Image (spheres, helix red, strand yellow):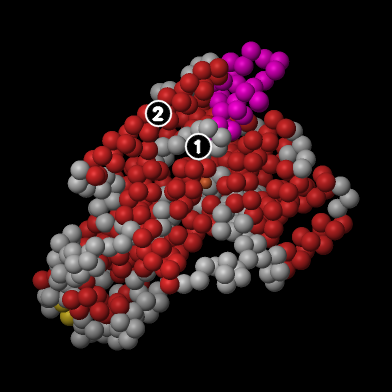
């Protein structure tokens, strides 16, 4: 196989499902009123679904502290058992290899890319002290305007670092959680009890966060995005505690609270809809994922190979005519010696086409796709790092820090307000004209929404909002 040219292909259009369509229409700086109305109708259907699920929330809010303590203790015990299992030589529980971990990172990206969004609609209530805890939680999700601490920006960097930023091929179920969060973001005034209930569920420390962080580190992947949630969501003083306090603070005064409690419970159960962390992790099959990647490539590459590229007597273009032949192509590549399974990837000629800067297929596979191929070739039979044990992420970071000066020593600024950006100049001009704190906040609120808070102007707006909120 020796393709003389591999054209950069057009994106293959896939018809998005209902949740993804809603997600895309809501993740805009100012979603259209029609999109918001549609989101409310969709959310009502999800709430009706949630109604059918079992709920472990206590019916009396006075029992919430004991419930929170019990949940935390149970997760602590389960994690201790996991660690003991690993120390006794047990295998990783979640991720069979790095490709599996990156598959997960991509698979939950629609949710993580809108992290914190469900609380956005409360930011308009900055003058009402009952909302202070939840608004603080939202601002902490946004890193208080520091790009390094903004959870969405952090996740984007993690995706980009491993060549996972082109997210395609996900199911509509994988957009359900993100769409719920965005629908709540743009419906807080209609769905306040549901927002509070959803937040109560989302901010509890789950076991999967702890295990994911542990196994990411072990695989040499940065676990920080996950560890920051372990520390930030803590039940003593963190987001979980604030979530519980908000129930008491925003409980209605003039009603008996039954309707509020019922709606809060439904909001809490929204957390269980769509594809969750474990669903995504368990849906991984290395060969199926590699075949999906090859099938996607086939639409782009079927006219890009010369006629003399033949595998088992057929031209590459012929193999690529039908995406369902991807598995057959993989077997043919193995049989004809282009792929050597069970050997280090560098020993496969096909791998060299992708890897070498002068290779005919250099740049065709993203970092993620290369990892999937590498792990499939190695087939769990190649000692990592050619016989050397792979460093954990933390160990490799310690090694790097001893060799390189830190970012602060290089004078890097966490919040570069001097960045050249037309939006920033415009915002500054508008703020100068504002006559009151309320005027300033009215300018800032639209910019700290899910679609904009991680941009330079959104980060600036978040810093300003945070400063004024703290002193309100
Ligand atoms: Fe977060």
Circle 1/circle 2 CB separation < 8 Å? no
Q: Main secondary structure of the magenta part?
A: helix
Residue 246: say if magenta: yes
Quarter of the image with the C terminus is top right
Give the percent coordinates (x, y) of residue 189.
Answer: 67, 34
CA–CA distance in space, label 1 to label 2: 12 Å
Residue sitting at the far right: 435
Q: At x 10% / y 71%, what residue is drawn?
A: 335
- Asked if ligand 1 lies within 8 A of label 1, the reply is no
Q: Does dot 1 land on a helix, a strand or a loop? A: loop
Quadrant housing residue 312 = bottom left
Q: At x 64% / y 41%, what residue is drawn?
A: 136
Quadrant housing residue 303 = bottom left
The stretch in magenta equals 240-264
Q: Which residue is mark 1?
A: 234
Which residue occupies the foreground of this view, 242 or 290?
242
Note whether residue 388 is visible: yes
Quarter of the image with the N terminus is bottom left
Which residue occupies the foreground of this view, 401 or 109?
401
Q: At x 11% / y 75%, what residue is drawn?
A: 336
In this view, 158 is above or below 260 = below
Residue 229: say if magenta: no
Q: Which residue is mark 2?
A: 73
Earlier-in-chain disc, 1 versus 2: 2
Residue 408 horizontal side relative to residue 91, left or right: right
In this view, 290 is above or below 225 = below
């Amino acid at each position: 196989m020796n393709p003389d040219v591999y054209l950069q292909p057009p994106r293959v259009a896939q018809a998005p499902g209902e949740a993804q369509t809603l997600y895309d229409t809501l993740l805009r700086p100012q979603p259209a009123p029609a999109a918001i109305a549609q989101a409310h109708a969709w959310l009502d259907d999800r709430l009706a679904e949630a109604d059918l699920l079992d709920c472990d929330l206590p019916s009396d809010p006075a029992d919430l502290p004991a419930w929170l303590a019990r949940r935390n203790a149970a997760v602590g015990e389960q994690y201790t058992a996991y660690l003991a299992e690993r120390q006794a030589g047990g295998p990783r529980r979640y991720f069979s290899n790095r490709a599996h971990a990156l598959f997960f990172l991509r698979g939950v990206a629609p949710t993580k890319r809108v992290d914190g969004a469900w609380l956005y609609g409360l930011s308009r209530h900055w003058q009402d002290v009952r909302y202070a805890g939840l608004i603080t939680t939202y601002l902490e999700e946004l890193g208080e305007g520091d790009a390094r601490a903004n959870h969405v920006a952090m996740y984007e960097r993690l995706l980009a670092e491993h060549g996972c930023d082109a997210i395609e091929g996900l199911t509509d179920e994988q957009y359900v959680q993100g769409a719920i969060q965005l629908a709540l973001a743009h419906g807080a005034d209609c769905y306040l009890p549901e927002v509070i209930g959803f937040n109560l569920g989302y901010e509890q420390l789950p076991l999967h966060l702890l295990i994911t962080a542990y196994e990411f580190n072990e695989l040499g992947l940065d676990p920080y995005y996950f560890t920051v949630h372990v520390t930030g969501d803590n039940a003593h003083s963190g987001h979980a505690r604030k979530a519980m306090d908000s129930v008491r603070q925003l409980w209605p005064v003039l009603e008996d609270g039954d309707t509020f409690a019922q709606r809060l419970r439904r909001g809490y159960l929204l957390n269980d809809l769509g594809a969750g962390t474990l669903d995504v992790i368990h849906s991984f099959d290395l060969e199926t994922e590699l075949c999906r990647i090859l099938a996607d490539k086939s639409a782009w590459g079927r006219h890009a190979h010369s006629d003399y590229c033949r595998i088992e007597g057929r031209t590459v273009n012929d193999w690529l005519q039908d995406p369902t032949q991807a598995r057959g192509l993989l077997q043919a590549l193995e049989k004809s010696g282009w792929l050597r399974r069970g050997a280090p990837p560098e020993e496969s000629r096909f791998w060299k086409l992708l890897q070498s800067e002068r290779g005919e297929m250099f740049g065709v596979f993203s970092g993620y796709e290369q990892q999937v191929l590498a792990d499939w070739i190695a087939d769990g039979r190649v000692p990592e790092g050619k016989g050397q044990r792979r460093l954990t992420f933390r160990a490799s970071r310690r090694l790097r820090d001893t060799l390189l000066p830190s970012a602060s020593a290089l004078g890097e600024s966490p919040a570069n307000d001097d960045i050249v950006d037309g939006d920033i100049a415009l915002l500054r001009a508008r703020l100068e004209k504002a006559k009151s704190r309320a005027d300033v906040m009215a300018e800032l609120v639209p910019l700290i929404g899910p679609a904009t808070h991680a941009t330079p102007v959104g980060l600036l707006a978040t810093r300003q909002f945070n400063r004024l909120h703290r002193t309100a």
